[in-house]
């Protein structure tokens, strides 16, 4: 690699490197030829990065420190925030003010009004100014806005699969829909990296359960961005479950259709809608998504099924919650923001 | 044990001992003080039973042979059929004719007309006479009929959880319901014991997928027995999924209510309906079913959730597919048929 | 059940009910016709027992309280201590003094001298008087002592499998052995029920590692009780590993034999040694132990293999760490102490 | 990419694409900028490659056909054989004769004499000429030979971890060693992709067992290549086990040392031996290998532990059996043969 090229490589920071999302951003960027990770931080652990993540021995000599705004400003051009919600909105304003680009993987800038934020995250929003300017980082729908954005609200894992699964139908045929039921199943890493009994191995292996039934904070996020696609906004019923696996989100989406429509027609609509999208695969009608086909990838696989007589449409979709549902999509957003090929590092 | 007691112990046969259901019947009966397993058979493997199931070393000296009607007639009073569908209806007539009682764990006698059987199992039914006489072995609904029955159609695993979850509402408040969506998730043992690539370890571990979407043969079974509860019969939409675990069925059931009703009222209805049932646990409203709580037990746990505003009711239920979903329920039926305490061997 | 019978049922206490071992003792005793659990306590959680262990709904109305010596004395005849080491030796003296029998599942009374205890558990032993009187609760070796004991040191999970695997050879043919290598693999429940990152689902699923290599505190326990079998005591090299499963211990034991001996002879020695033992199954030479055959049982399965040319003997053994490795063996000890059939509740 | 560059890209064939190893070669080569996979075949399945491996939708338009020597000769420069043993030696001679390079992932060319092959693989070797010329593809030991080779015998998964773990000690300090015990644990994918009951999900999940105890065909492979390092050849005792996970091999290696030596000295020997090796990570003494740190990578992690008093050395090592234990190492060999950077496609 020539010296000249190195000088123009963008310098990347990852705040919250001790979590699974932050770690996955780093892992992807090891294979990205146009950026260098120059700053990593975490508040609960410090020291050699390879002591925190020994799998990276031989790949990096980075040191992890407590977040320090001066260091972050000095060492980075763009910063990924892989921190808990409420923390992101404390860090973001100063980074933006100093001209850095920010991709926030937390929920802080996803809901675009303070009332919803307060209702679902139990706290007043602290950065209303940037809340309005944040761009929702779902490239398949907001690519043009992302190109010009300084602050990306990286979508939630469940909403990524849900919105991609529903966008063609809601955009183009909302009149078919009354309400939508989303039965979602997530791998355990979706809950983050925590030392709690509920997420201990023995409590989860060979187990399965629902949680936050009809009451999960990703519900308003799904509703909001579907509404932006079409003012006729369907009601969303959302129930998440915990799968005894490390990674992956599978959603089974039920729509009672108000009019007759053939499966082939729906399939054609989906195929056309995502024709040029590299990371959304609308499967042939004889195929169905499964988590192993998207694990460790940035793909969202979508399957379609219809009972003609009962007019029931079932959309199934699968993503890797840590990749397309978090870190991969974040890098996809970075690539768009910085003018790189959108799939760089992601294939 | 006195000689006198031995002579009155019922002699039990298990046809299809090499599968998971047959094996589980045997395992339960080891702890049943009033019966002796005197005959086991399998068509794909023969020899010492402990060569087929080494976990039973020290517990049994039974030998497994190819099914032989003469042996079965000579050695048993009651026979469990844990065989594939289409096989059960070939074996059953002669056993019944000779005065034996039969509990069929296959699907052969569950649908009560030949048209449905042909449609869903792709074969003409071969024993129409007994098809009409078979009693559906869901004790919580058909206990009185089971007492008098000679032939039990032991319910399917998915229908057991579905019908128990829905019976109180459908029986008493069918007017609230338009249609019902059942999103079901099953452990791998539900598919039986097979040497196929699709069920190999590497294809399933860390994986999850839907199958037979809106097209599973348990759909008409659920519809049929709900219809028997109430002539206003709701439409059923049923989608099963495969969980990367050995055992357990979890169902998430969605009902868009046509009228307002409070969660407490629904809870009270369920509590009352199952008040005297030992094996159905209607959970308190602050609790939710999880598979680990019913694994290796004959319980069906039921949880209730409601979004008042959206009038969406979600019923969740959990059973062990090999116990309450197959062998446990079969033994429960046997206990009722033979006049033993219903929970004998099952707690 | 008649009143008369109730009055003679023994009253059992379980201290440390919130852990996996304490819970498993309770679960086993639900099926034990001759005792009643009358007292349960835990220091980290209190309230309805079914709030701590919802799987027991319908089976018990017990309430869990903080350990209180007066309550324990008033309500129990025999107490299981399923508490961390160092806690047991604080509770035990008063219980014994007041005439209660104690079965301690912790490590506190296993090593019979204070120096070893201090070396391996980093603490002075606080109850030297009872340390000397405690009987090591491995019924296959110490049944007669257990009958007369008031205090049982219930063996560690690894030592149970190791000592049972080695007892016949060490007792009868120690001259064949120089040293013994034990490569042990344990399910995660062996580590107890803890909220730590190291035991979280995502850190362990699809993972495997060794820990405390050549330095685990069960090493001296194995050495001690092998030495009691034969003064020619072999050196033990012990390495434990963590399996990504809930339950089970598998040990692969390597012995370089000093003299030629045939596999059939060794097998005959083992068969004879355990001839009357219900819970040790010396497998035929064409069979090998596997964890699924002992899961949820009190069995210890033992397999034998020999390379004649290289004079290498390999003994494999499998137990369920929560049953024969903890709670099941504890109940087996209770049965012996109280004069019940040894297998009561355990088959 | 310029046309000119495309013309000089090497054309790669993969024979046996329907197995896990063949699939993994392909997956790695998608990220390799200097080669193109131009031919894939399988004997048990044909058609669109994405019907066999749907996870590759969007990445390839290759079609899989039955192996045809003419096609293979016409379309490829180098061929990976990911076929069962005995098949490779039938395909290899003609490919070599026509000037193709061959990397054989089967066992056919690993043992360098016909007697051993017959003894361990129960068949006469059919290609003695090339058996002598094949180079054992362990780059860390045979890099210079690999550069000049036309036929690579890609090492077995167990031998890769074993030989890398032992090479420094056996090469430089064989006098310390009498015999070596290798307790190996493998994920299920090591057994290949098969439709057999033994490898079905329910038989393996939550299970663990040993197999081919002291009798596995990788034993002579390990002995052979250790002997090449040092004529004082230690005896190898090898016991493999099956882990209930998809991928990974963990080996725990026991060496009773004949002389005193410090752990730091051994560690220094290992560090120096692998100083320039990118894919072997000798861990610091406070660290230990674990499978998750090498999953999906080409690394071999090695840990060292010593009990000074007992003179017992324990070496632990971890690889991904499908990567460093098969496909990754095969690509590493290809890179060396074709003059590419050794880590191309592998980081």
Image (tube, coloured by chain):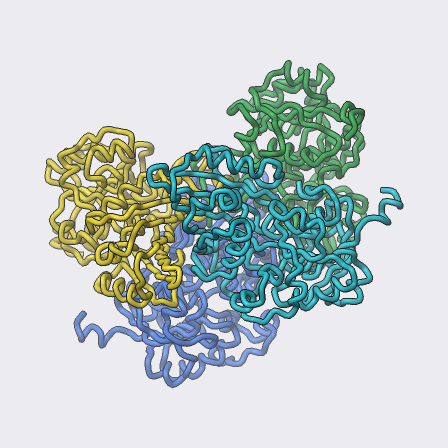
Chain colours: A cyan, B yellow, C blue, D green
Q: Quadrant of the N terminus of chain B?
A: bottom left
Residue B117 position within the rendered picture, expressed as x and y whole percent measured from the top left: 24, 34
Q: Nearer the viewer, residue A140 or D197?
A: A140
Residue at 39% x, 36% y is: B194
Quarter of the image that includes the C terminus of chain B = bottom left
Q: Quadrant of residue A122?
A: bottom right
Q: Where is residue C21 in the image (x, y as percent from the top left)?
A: 43, 66
Whether residue B105 sits left or right of residue A335 in the image: it is left
Q: Residue A41 lies in what quarter of the image?
A: bottom right
Q: In this rendering, would B228 be left or right of C180?
A: left
Q: Is residue B62 left or right of residue D83?
A: left
Does residue B137 lie above or below C34 as drawn?
Answer: above
Residue A75 picture location, percent across and down: 81, 59
Q: Which of D333 and D54 is in front in this view?
A: D54
- Is residue C256 depicted above or below A282 in this figure? below
Count of labels in the image = 0
Q: Which one is in front, C197 or B55? A: C197
- The residue drawn where x is 53% and y is 81% is C126
Q: Which of B100 and A294 is in front in this view?
A: A294
Q: Where is residue D111 in the image (x, y as percent from the top left)?
A: 65, 28
Q: Residue C150, can we see it?
A: no
Viewed as shown, does residue B98 lie left or right of B115?
left
Q: Can residue C218 be seen in this view?
A: yes
């Amino acid at each position: 690699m020539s010296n000249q090229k190195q000088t123009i490589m963008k310098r990347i920071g990852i705040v919250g490197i001790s979590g699974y999302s932050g770690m996955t951003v780093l892992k992807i960027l090891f294979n990205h030829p146009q950026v260098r990770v120059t700053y990593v931080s975490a508040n609960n652990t410090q020291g050699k990065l390879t002591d925190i993540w020994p799998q990276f021995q031989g790949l990096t000599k980075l040191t992890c420190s407590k977040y320090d705004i001066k260091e972050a400003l000095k060492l980075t051009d763009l910063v990924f925030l892989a921190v808990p919600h409420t923390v992101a909105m404390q860090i973001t304003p100063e980074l933006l003010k100093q001209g850095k680009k920010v991709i926030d993987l937390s929920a802080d800038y996803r809901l675009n009004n303070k009332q919803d934020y307060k209702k679902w995250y139990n706290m007043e929003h602290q950065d209303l100014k940037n809340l309005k300017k944040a761009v929702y980082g779902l490239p398949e729908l907001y690519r043009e806005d992302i190109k010009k954005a300084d602050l990306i609200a990286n979508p939630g894992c469940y909403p990524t699969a849900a919105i991609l699964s529903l966008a063609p139908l809601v955009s183009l045929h909302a009149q078919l829909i009354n309400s939508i039921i989303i039965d979602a199943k997530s791998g355990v890493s979706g809950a983050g990296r925590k030392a709690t009994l509920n997420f201990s191995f023995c409590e989860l292996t060979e187990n399965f359960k629902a949680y936050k039934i009809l009451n999960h904070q990703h519900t308003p996020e799904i509703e909001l961005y579907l509404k932006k696609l079409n003012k006729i906004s369907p009601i969303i019923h959302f129930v998440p479950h915990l799968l005894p696996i490390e990674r992956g989100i599978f959603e089974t989406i039920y729509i009672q259709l108000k009019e007759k429509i053939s499966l082939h027609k729906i399939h054609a609509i989906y195929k056309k809608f995502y024709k040029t999208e590299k990371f959304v695969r609308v499967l042939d009608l004889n195929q169905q998504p499964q988590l192993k086909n998207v694990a460790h990838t940035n793909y969202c696989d979508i399957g379609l099924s219809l009972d003609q007589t009962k007019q029931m449409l079932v959309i199934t979709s699968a993503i890797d919650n840590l990749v397309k549902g978090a870190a991969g999509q974040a890098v996809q957003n970075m690539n768009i923001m910085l003018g790189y090929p959108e799939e760089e590092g992601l294939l």
